[in-house]
Amino acid sequence: MSKSISQSDEAPPPSKKTKMASHLTLGATHNQILEQRKSLKKQIHSLPRDQKSKVLSHFHGSERTDLSKQRLRNLREDDKHQDMSNMSDVQRHTLDKRKRRHNPALQRQMHRRETKRLQNAMAAADAEEILHTHTTGLVEVETDMERTIQLTQQQLKNEHLQESVARNIFDLELKDYGPYKVRYDRSGRYSLLAGAGGHVSIIDQHSLALTSEFFVNETVRDACFLHNGSMMAVAQEKNVFVYDDKGVEIHRMDGHRRVMGMEFLPYHWLLGK
């Protein structure tokens, strides 16, 4: 005799053992986070004193503007002077037990955030070293009879500047197709020279080498790089042309005649004329 088994009589599927949220970690494990935090602290303590102070200032924040630190101090003072006169012995015991109990999930979260703060502090110190200039340079005379206007560029290059700085000074004699307009790409490595006589060239500022040079046989009123140094827009007599870094024509914008100035908007990918 066959017996029909209803859906309710079937054996339930084996339940999967779900992980608690405290056991889940994003990215690296807790041990990897601890090792990374340890190496970051060791790296910070091995820095010179001035760099170490910059990193720690970014890590700890400003005492004047960080209101959360003052709030944390107030909460700790309130915990120390907490009034427990109205509590029973059981309530006091429960409160002390909760204070002594460790929260592994909270500790992992605090360790992860501290590691991220250390990484951000080191990155902020590096950015400050790059973006923030030091004391601005100046020319100071030794006596009151001297005048800084008498100091020539050649004397400044040969006698007063460091060799690494003086090496970046160069002269360009462009007399045949001027006047010229100079533009730089967003990285600052490549410069674009556009002469009114139709001469267009690109110079690598790191090596001071001529990357590209061509003639358009028309009047050039303006030129600018586009999203990077591989493409440029040149406003010529009749139209605006787009060239690559080798001087090959990519596109022609008909109807844009007698454009006197251009500017490329990199965040909108628009060429304003």
Image (spheres, rainbow, N blue to C red):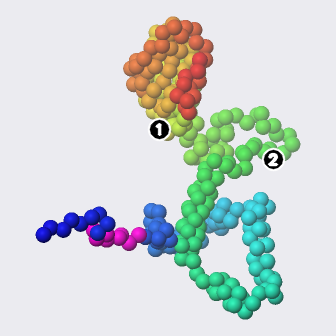
| Quadrant of the frame with the C terminus | top right
Check whether the beta carbons of the residues at disc 1 and disc 2 lie within 8 A of each other. no
The answer to whether any part of residue 54 appears in the image is: no
Report the magenta stretch's main SS: loop
Q: Which residue is mark 1?
A: 207
Please give the label number shown on residue 96: none
Q: CA distance from mark 1 to mark 2?
A: 36 Å
Q: Which residues are magenta?
A: 10-18
Q: Earlier in the sequence, mark 1 or mark 2?
A: 2
Q: Position of residue 209 (x, y in %)?
A: 45, 33
Q: Is 226 situated above or below 11?
A: above
Queried whether the magenta region covers residue 256, the answer comes back as no
Q: Which residue is mark 2?
A: 142
Queried whether the magenta region covers residue 11, the answer comes back as yes
Report the residue at 63% width, 40% height from top.
Answer: 157
| Quadrant of the frame with the N terminus | bottom left
The single residue placed furthest to the bottom in the displayed view is 89
Q: Observer-nearest residue: 101 or 237?
A: 101
Depth check, mark 1 against mark 2: the one in front is 1
Q: Position of residue 272 (x, y in %)?
A: 58, 21
Report the residue at 75% width, 90% height from top.
Answer: 88
Q: Position of residue 150 (x, y in %)?
A: 76, 34
The answer to whether any part of residue 101 appears in the image is: yes
**Quadrant position of residue 52:** bottom right
What amino acid type should be assigned to the residue bearing mark 2?
A: Glu
Q: Observer-nearest residue: 203 or 55?
A: 55
